[in-house]
């Protein structure tokens, strides 16, 4: 991660899918999570961001996929740039241009890859070369899961108890296990309640304390399953952890129901393919209705064929495990 010069830099970061979920914060302003989490970076779903510090105070400018961003997105990016301005004692406005290589509006969260790429581009354009853990902690302030898009491969975010101790690190590299995320896009609608608002509600569920109290056991078990590439053990824990997070969401006040009827059909089908047909696949869902079907590369074609047979309404995206955030050769904004 070498820094750039001339106040401009281009960086890329990949989205990630969590196997042990982050849900709820112990400190909302610092985004210190209620629990540690573990994810896999997604090689084929990424955000590329070019950032230029303009050298004078003023309004930031943000473009996403070639069009000016809506005010909400700009406010969130500017708030993150404020953190960076305060940290490095400068006031310059920035021009930011960001592109996602995955289709916008498919309900695939882009905040992890977006804030990881933004943090790396912003610091690189300052000529600053942060250590990986510092960059991960910085990205966390923009979006919690962005902390996990900085290191490469399979990544663990230790919750920590202060800004400096809450960062993510590689658990094993991407080539350790050829897992694939086959994403069943069952709905293109945007989240009615985004994850930042959802985290604020997590403690209103009586189930959150039980989920958090038991998460270290699942984290150890999923790490052991990944280390030994034990898919059967992995599948049971990943599904349980996703179900637990959604149980918390559904019992929060007000309740959050992220699943669509088709999400549940896919989840039940995945369990049936595993139990009845011996197809090694399991599911996990984030704060949305799309079902991430996790399998080994050799089974991805069968999983995709089964999904197509199940419903013509399912659009499919796919990614294997991928690298961490990196600086790219510079181009003008
Ligand atoms: O980083 P956020 O605030 O978008 O939270 C992500 C929360 C989940 O995607 C639902 C779970 C996770 O660990 O990625």
Image (spheres, rainbow, N blue to C red):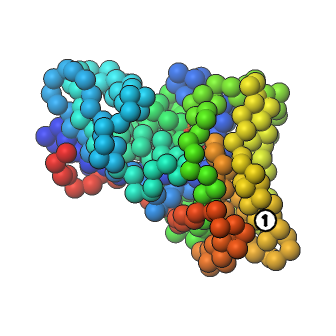
Which residue is denoted by mark 1 in the rendering?
269
SS type, badge 1: helix
Q: Is residue 52 left or right of residue 279?
A: left
How busy is the neighbourhood of tag 1: few (under 14 within 10 Å), some, or many (20 plus)?
Answer: some
- In percent of width and height, residue 158 lies at 60, 40
Question: Residue, x 76% and y 65% (percent of image)?
Answer: 270
The correct choice, above or below, for 57 with respect to 320 in the image is: above
Q: Is residue 153 or residue 64 the one in the foreground? A: 64
- Residue 271 location in percent, x, y? 80, 64
Q: Is residue 97 visible?
A: yes
State the residue at coordinates (45%, 56%).
102
Q: Position of 301 compared to 250: left or right?
A: left
Say how many tags the image has.
1
Q: Quadrant of ligand 1?
A: top right
Residue 228 in view, yes or no: no
Q: Is residue 45 above or below residue 243?
A: below
Identify the residue at the far right of this view. Answer: 276
- Residue 196, given in percent of the width and then of the height, sits at 57, 30
The residue at the point 20 percent across, 20 percent down is 57
Q: Which residue sits at x=58%, y=63%?
A: 315
The answer to which of 55 and 265 lies nearer the viewer is: 265
Q: In terms of image quadrants, where is residue 184?
A: bottom right
Q: 100 and 11: which one is in front?
A: 100
Q: Quadrant of the C terminus?
A: top left
From the top left corner, tell me how far across and down residue 247 is, in percent: 79, 39
In the foreground, 45 or 222: 45
The answer to which image quadrant residue 36 occupies is top right
């Amino acid at each position: 991660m070498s820094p750039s010069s001339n106040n401009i830099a281009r960086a890329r970061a990949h989205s990630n899918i969590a196997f042990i979920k982050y849900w709820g914060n112990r400190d909302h302003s610092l985004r210190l999570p209620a629990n540690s989490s573990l994810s896999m970076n997604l090689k084929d779903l990424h955000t590329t961001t070019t950032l230029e510090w303009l050298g004078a105070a003023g309004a930031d400018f943000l473009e996403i996929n070639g069009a000016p961003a809506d005010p909400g997105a700009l406010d969130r990016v500017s708030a993150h740039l404020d953190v960076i301005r305060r940290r490095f004692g400068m006031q310059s406005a920035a021009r930011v241009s960001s592109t996602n290589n995955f289709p916008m509006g498919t309900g695939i969260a882009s905040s992890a890859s977006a804030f990881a790429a933004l943090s790396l581009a912003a610091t690189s354009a300052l000529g600053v070369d942060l250590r990986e853990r510092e960059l991960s902690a910085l990205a966390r302030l923009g979006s919690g899961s962005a902390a996990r898009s900085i290191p490469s491969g399979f990544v663990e975010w230790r919750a920590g108890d202060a800004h400096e101790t809450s960062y993510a690190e590689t658990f094993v590299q991407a080539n350790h296990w050829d897992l694939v995320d086959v994403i069943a896009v069952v709905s293109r609608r945007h989240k009615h309640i985004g994850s930042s608002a959802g985290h604020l509600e997590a403690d209103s569920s009586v189930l959150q304390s039980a989920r958090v109290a038991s998460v270290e056991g699942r984290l150890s078990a999923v790490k052991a399953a990944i280390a030994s590439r034990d898919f059967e053990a992995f599948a049971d824990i990943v599904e349980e952890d996703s179900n637990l997070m959604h149980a918390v969401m559904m019992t929060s006040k007000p309740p959050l129901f992220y699943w669509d009827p088709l999400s549940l059909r896919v989840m039940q089908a995945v369990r049936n393919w595993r139990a009845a047909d011996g197809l090694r696949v399991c599911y996990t869902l984030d704060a949305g209705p799309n079902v991430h079907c996790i399998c080994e590369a050799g089974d991805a074609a069968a999983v995709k064929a089964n999904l197509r047979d199940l419903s013509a309404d399912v659009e499919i995206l796919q990614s294997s495990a991928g690298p961490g955030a990196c600086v790219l050769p510079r181009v003008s904004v």
